[in-house]
Image (tube, helix red, strand yellow):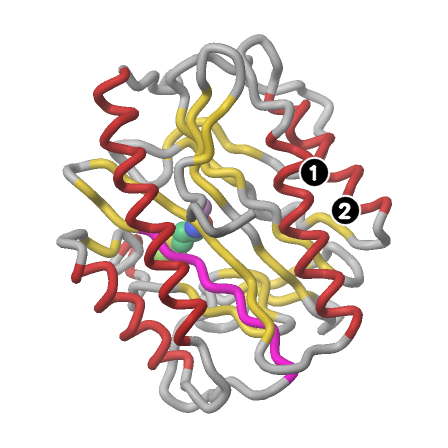
Amino acid sequence: MAISIKNDHEIDLMRTAGQILAKVHYELKRELKEGMTTKDVDRLGEEIIRSYGCIPNFLNYNGYPASICVSVNNEVVHGIPNDVRRLKEGDIVSLDAGLIYKGYHSDAARTHGIGEISEEAAKLIAVTEQSFFEGVQYAKPGNHLVDIARGIQSYAENNGFSVVRDLTGHGIGKALHEEPEIPNFVRRRRGARLQKGMTLAIEPMINAGSYDVWWLEDDWTVVTRDGRLSAHYENTIAITDDGYEILTLHPEER
Ligand code: MF3
Ligand code: CO
């Protein structure tokens, strides 16, 4: 299977899907508070997505039982919301969400601190977010996926953190996960050559300690093997004539 190329009309639809998701994250960030259960966060996220007439694309995806992934502290990604765990001061919480608008998917993640967080946690969140921008600056026609990966990895590692190897970003469009895989670390193979009309979800997962992860018994929740913190930041982007456009950024972010 080849990487799908979207025409301008499709990019318009994906831009709308992305801008709605940006609002979802913006509203979630505003409402996120100590004492909420992770299920409260999921319910709220689903409600906001549906309030825009969109469908949460994670719900039932390969059997995933919720609309939002809520991953706390040592959880890297795909944390399943539950009504037992309550967010508490000092936690860091990764919210990964996506939706479908007129048949097109968007996907984005943000990591937030609850109340006052440790210096290490704050640095991890900031470096993870910035690592996305250090990578995405290489997203333009003619460059290869490895150019993005190199930007992400070198920034994260220069700041003393590590890049998760077992999970990657992905193409996105009429499906949540399309080709290609988008690693956040340099592989021997340079990967696909970027072209106008490609739409990609770039999602660095950065660990405070070692990059090693494992899966909990629920077969979804990915946690750090050393129990240290992990953060996640993701946007859906489109490759343009001479660079990229970030589809899931809120006007008041960055
Ligand atoms: N952003 C996540 C990813 O690309 C989507 C989660 S899929 C779900 O892996 F099944 F967990 F919902
Ligand atoms: Co994704």
What's under tag 2, amino acid-wise? Ala
- Residue 18 vs 197, above or below: the answer is below
Q: Which of the two residues, 191 or 250, is positioned nearer the viewer here?
A: 250
Which residue shows up at 61% across the image and 46% down it? 204
Contact check, label 2 and label 1, Cβ < 8 Å: yes
Examine the residues drawn in magenta and state their main secondary structure: strand
Indicate the position of residue 92 as horizontal and vertical percent values: 60, 73
Q: Which of the two residues, 154 or 219, is positioned nearer the viewer here?
A: 154
**Helix, strand or loop at mark 2:** helix
- Residue 158 vs 182, above or below: the answer is below
Which residue shows up at 47% across the image and 12% down it? 195
Residues in magenta? Answer: 90-98
**Helix, strand or loop at mark 1:** helix
Which residue is under mark 2? 156
Indicate the position of residue 3 as horizontal and vertical percent values: 39, 19
Which residue shows up at 40% across the image and 36% down it? 247
